[in-house]
Amino acid sequence: MLAIVAAIIFGLGFLLDLVGVRIPGGFSGMTFALLGLCLLALHQAGVGKAGFRTGYSNWRGRARR
């Protein structure tokens, strides 16, 4: 989930940098790029992983036996 959010933020940052727009408050394309990198790092660290799929596969394996 965090990787999807990071991709959206990277796209938004790319568009802001391409157009050369700064959002009031100091947000620029680079700010969004750094935020996207932070979200990707959290994703790689395992934050925000959904564990329900593992339980589903275990249930399915038990049903076959």
Image: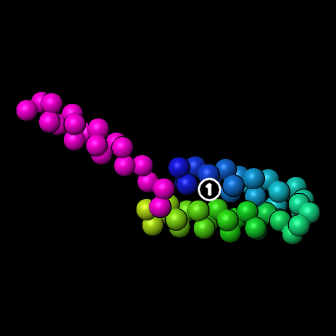
**Residue 20 visible to the viewer:** no
How far across and how far down the image is residue 4, in percent? 58, 49
Q: Looking at the picture, does residue 13 appear above or below residue 58?
A: below
Is residue 6 highlighted in magenta? no
Looking at the magenta stretch, what is its main secondary structure? helix
Q: Is residue 11 above or below residue 63?
A: below
As displayed, is residue 34 above or below residue 5? below
Q: What element carries label 1?
A: helix
52 in the magenta segment? yes
Q: How many labels does the image show?
A: 1
Q: What's the residue at 73%, 62% (across, down)?
A: 32
Q: In which quarter of the image is the C terminus?
A: top left
Residue extending furthest top? 64
Q: Give me the residue at 82% from left, 60% from top.
A: 17
Name the foreground residue: 15 vs 54: 54
Residue positioned 36% across, 43% down in the render: 52
The residue carrying pointer 1 sits among few (fewer than 14), some (14 to 19) or many (20 or more) residues within 10 Å by Cα, namely many
| Residue 49 or residue 11, whichever sits in front | 49
Q: Which residue is drawn at 64% across and 62% down?
A: 36
Q: In this view, does 27 lie above or below 59?
A: below
Query: Does residue 58 appear left or right of residue 21 in this picture?
Result: left
| Left or right of residue 27: residue 40 | left
Magenta stretch, residue numbers: 47-65
- Position in image of residue 59 (x %, y %): 22, 36
Q: In this view, does 53 lie to the left or right of 41?
A: left
Residue 41 seen from this side: yes
What residue is shown with label 1? 6
Q: For the residue marked with disc 1, what is the amino acid?
A: Ala
Residue located farthest toward the left when viewing the structure as drawn: 65
In the image, 1 versus 37, the foreground residue is 1
